[in-house]
Image (spheres, helix red, strand yellow):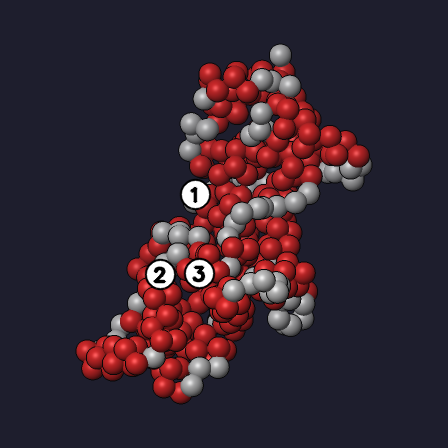
Amino acid sequence: MAGATIALRAAALRRKSDSDVLQRALAGDPVAFSEAYRRYQRPIYAYCLARLMSPDAAADATQEVFVRLLHNGSASVESPRAWLFGIARNVCADVFRKRSGEALEPDLSEISERLDGVASGDSAEAVLEKETARNVFHALRRLRPRYRTALILREIHGQSSADIGEAMSMTPGAVDTLVCRARDAFGRTYADVAGFPEACRHAVTLMYRRTGTGISQSEQAALETHIKTCPRCRHEAEKADDHGHLPALLPFLAAAHGTRGPLSAAAQALQMPHGAALTRLTPLAQWQHLSPVAQRIVIAATAAAVVTAPLAGKVA
């Protein structure tokens, strides 16, 4: 009966506004927390990933954002998304402070596997793509954090100017300007990292500025002339105009997975069919260090896990 009640409440909460859901989560409602997690986890993770450039660090930071949500106790939240992203900004800043200003190192094993693992049977084209991916990654890391964040959220995660604005505390118009400038900066940095000859470096810079703040007619004519005589730059121009190229090169910078730990496991379990939920929740019973709020979430998730998926489907 308790499980059925939780399933019904979870379905009802999906019809509530963001403000209502978040206020209930702040009050310690475990089912509302699960719904808030469902709505916000991916964009929060994407933001942390863009700032930190490390899937593991981003997962830990996202977990911390939701922990702080549970312990905030704020009486009123006018803009839930902006409020949550404000917490995410603070969490990412804390990560950098703990590193004493040093550059945050990404998950080297994962990045090495994706960028440096060249199999003996790889074609020349595959080897070139891996080298390009490595150069793109290092160019992104060299960008100013605001440029990198805006560029990754737009180009890799496809977020709107309004969504990026909430994440970065900017107006949509200011985001559009920032993204254009970020494209300019990326073109210059990428050309430098890749070690192009001077003429090609200038051409690559123009390619990305063309999709950023723009280039003049004379610059466009010079770029077209160079591309006709340079196969490498012709290939680079195709990539620069392909909005799906960055996420294909750097899939680990896409929000494919999320947070780790007891809170995320319990919150996700409330959104799963009962069999998968029980599998997810079983290890939680061994975690004795959970806070009282986390314990309530695990209990609620366990109760919901015994409810069949058809019941949730009928009331959704």
Q: Position of residue 316 (x, y in %)?
A: 45, 22
Near mark 1 (Cα within 10 A), the count class, few <14, some 14-19 or many ≥20, is few
Camera-nearest label, 1 or 3: 3
- Residue displayed at 33% across by 73% down: 234
Q: Quadrant of residue 32?
A: top right
Q: Nearer the viewer, residue 293 or 72?
A: 293
Q: Position of residue 279 (x, y in %)?
A: 69, 29
Q: Which residue is mark 1?
A: 78
Q: Which residue is mark 3?
A: 246
Marks 1/3: CA–CA distance: 35 Å
21 vs 260, left or right, is: left
Marks 2 and 1 in Cβ contact (< 8 Å): no
Q: Quadrant of residue 197?
A: bottom left
Which amino acid type corresponds to the residue marked 3 in the rendered image? Answer: Leu
Q: Which residue is mark 2?
A: 242
Q: Is residue 264 above or below residue 160?
A: above
Does label 2 or label 1 sit earlier along the sequence? 1
- Residue displayed at 68% across by 26% down: 278
Near mark 3 (Cα within 10 A), the count class, few <14, some 14-19 or many ≥20, is many
Marks 2/1: CA–CA distance: 38 Å
